Image (cartoon, rainbow, N blue to C red):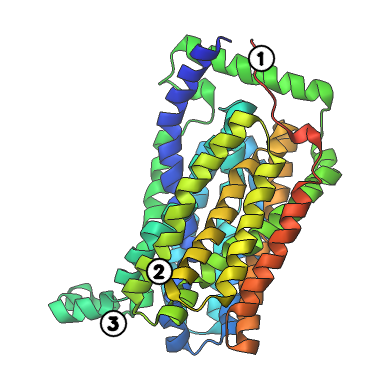
């Protein structure tokens, strides 16, 4: 395929798909971590300890783990459009239902069910990108898609801060009586109710907007569709000529399990920071919820810019492993600094370095498994990596809460995150050369 023609097709695909996928992931990630903002009121109202909150926040990932691989295999069988719509509608309803939490049992149950409902969304999207993009374009596309993590926190911080005060606003302006039973909702209940609804709306939109693959893309010309399908088929053929993995072989592959452990360490940090960052910032700043929400956005603004540039650099150089190791080490440095710095602006700068490093590693990381897995093996392998790795989403918040309970400070938790990032940086160097970039060839 002519490279200029290929670039034109991929640009067209990008403008059509990535913005929509990006918005979906913003909503997805916000519904995972908005419990961290809700905790600014919820812990006090319901009498939750740091350990209870940390466990309940993390139990989401147990449900996520249980249904992750089956969900991705179902997606490959029934198509992305139908299955992603199902995922988004059910998780949106359950996310809004978090407003009904009354104690530890209901907190744990709803967080578990939220993870069960959402399982398969992220690995499904990663798999979906392989239906459209050759290997040499995937790191930057994954990075663009995953900036939704950063933007969810950029937008979600201030919005959540406002929603936490919505009960007071409703009372002050006198319109709460219009909504009957929900008139007495607390701010944290308003947060869950309102932030869960966009997922339902977007889930319905998926049914009408998202094609299952290039063969359904009516917005591409027939020649563009055939050219893209041929390009991707040729790349898949080249990979399978080297080694074709079955589903069982992929799930038993040592390199896949190494990636599982590597992703586990990254997720410990992504969610250890994401869930606890609002409370860390409130602790060192002493500010009210709305200002905490605004300050929480700063590290993710830095990370959003950095992760796109870093993913682009990884694609341009064709290198993956060091593009995971370097940001992991930078993030570790940031967390060590944040653990000891006393002046709030410097502490916030150090946390920003941590967020930049964690998110910067994600685009190059997800280019690793798709470099050697295809078809059902890719569906199962990606789901396995994501499901095992996301158990770090349970471990990070829980250990942070446990260490906070023991020491009444966040220093040991931040040092724990830094230590796991050193492990991540080391593991990235052990991944084989087979996961390096496949250079495009003419079709």
> In the rendered view, does 193 fall on the left or right side of 430?
left
How far from the left and from the top, in percent, is residue 242? 83, 24
**Which residue is denoted by mark 1 in the rendering?**
441
Viewer-nearest of discs 1 and 2: 1
**Which residue is denoted by mark 3 in the rendering?**
184
Q: Quadrant of the N terminus?
A: top right
Mark 3, residues whose alpha carbon is within 10 Å: few (<14), some, or many (≥20)?
A: some
Mark 2, residues whose alpha carbon is within 10 Å: few (<14), some, or many (≥20)?
A: many
Q: Quadrant of the C terminus?
A: top right
Alpha carbon of mark 1 to alpha carbon of mark 3: how far?
62 Å
Q: Quadrant of residue 76?
A: top right
How far from the left and from the top, in percent, is residue 290? 32, 73
How far from the left and from the top, in percent, is residue 72? 65, 44
**Which residue is denoted by mark 2 in the rendering?**
192
Q: Earlier in the sequence, mark 1 or mark 2?
A: 2
Viewer-nearest of discs 2 and 3: 2
Observer able to see residue 385? yes
In percent of the image, x 56 and y 87: which residue is there? 49
Q: Earlier in the sequence, mark 2 or mark 3?
A: 3
> In the rendered view, does 433 fall on the left or right side of 383?
right
Q: Secondary structure at mark 3?
A: helix
Mark 1, residues whose alpha carbon is within 10 Å: few (<14), some, or many (≥20)?
A: few
Observer able to see residue 59? no
Q: How many marks?
A: 3
Q: Earlier in the sequence, mark 1 or mark 3?
A: 3
Q: Quadrant of residue 57?
A: bottom right
In percent of the image, x 46 and y 61: which residue is there? 31
Alpha carbon of mark 2 to alpha carbon of mark 3: how far?
14 Å
């Amino acid at each position: 395929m002519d490279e200029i023609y290929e670039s034109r097709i991929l640009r067209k695909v990008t403008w059509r798909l990535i913005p929509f996928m990006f918005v979906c992931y913003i909503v997805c990630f916000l519904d995972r971590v908005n419990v961290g903002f809700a905790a600014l009121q919820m812990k006090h109202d319901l009498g939750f300890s740091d350990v209870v909150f940390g466990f309940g926040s993390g139990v989401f990932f147990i449900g996520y783990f249980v249904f992750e691989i089956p969900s991705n295999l179902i997606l490959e069988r029934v198509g992305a459009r139908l299955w992603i719509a199902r995922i988004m509608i059910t998780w949106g309803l359950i996310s809004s239902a978090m407003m009904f939490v009354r104690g530890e049992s209901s907190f744990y149950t709803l967080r578990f069910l939220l993870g069960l409902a959402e399982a398969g969304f992220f690995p499904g999207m990663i798999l979906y990108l392989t239906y459209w993009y050759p290997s040499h374009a995937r790191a930057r596309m994954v990075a663009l898609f995953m900036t939704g993590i950063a933007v969810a926190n950029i937008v979600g911080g201030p919005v959540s801060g406002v929603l936490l005060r919505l009960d007071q606003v409703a009372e002050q302006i006198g319109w709460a009586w219009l909504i009957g039973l929900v008139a007495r909702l607390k701010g944290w209940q308003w947060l869950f109710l309102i932030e869960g609804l966009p997922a339902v709306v977007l889930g319905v939109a998926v049914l009408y907007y998202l094609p299952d693959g290039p063969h359904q893309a009516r917005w591409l010309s027939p020649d563009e569709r055939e050219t893209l399908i041929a390009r991707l088929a040729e790349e898949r053929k080249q990979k399978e000529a080297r080694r074709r993995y079955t589903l069982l072989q992929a799930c038993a592959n040592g390199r896949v399990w190494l990636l599982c452990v590597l992703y586990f360490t990254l997720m410990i940090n992504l969610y250890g920071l994401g869930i606890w960052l609002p409370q860390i910032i409130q602790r060192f700043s002493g500010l009210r919820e709305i200002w905490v929400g605004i300050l929480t956005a700063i590290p993710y603004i830095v990370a959003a810019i950095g992760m796109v540039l870093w993913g682009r650099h990884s694609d341009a150089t064709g290198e993956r492993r060091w593009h995971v190791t370097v940001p992991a080490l930078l993030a570790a440095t940031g967390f060590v600094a944040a653990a000891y710095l006393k002046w709030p602006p410097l502490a916030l700068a150090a946390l920003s370095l941590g967020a930049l490093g964690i998110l910067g590693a994600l685009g190059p990381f997800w280019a690793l498994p798709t470099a050697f897995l295809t078809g059902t093996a890719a569906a199962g392998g990606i789901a396995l990596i994501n499901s095992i790795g996301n158990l770090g989403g349970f471990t990070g918040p829980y250990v942070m809460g446990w260490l906070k309970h023991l020491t009444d400070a966040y220093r040991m938790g931040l040092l724990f995150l830094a230590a796991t990032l050193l492990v991540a940086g080391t593991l990235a160097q052990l991944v084989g050369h087979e996961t390096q970039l496949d250079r495009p060839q003419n079709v």
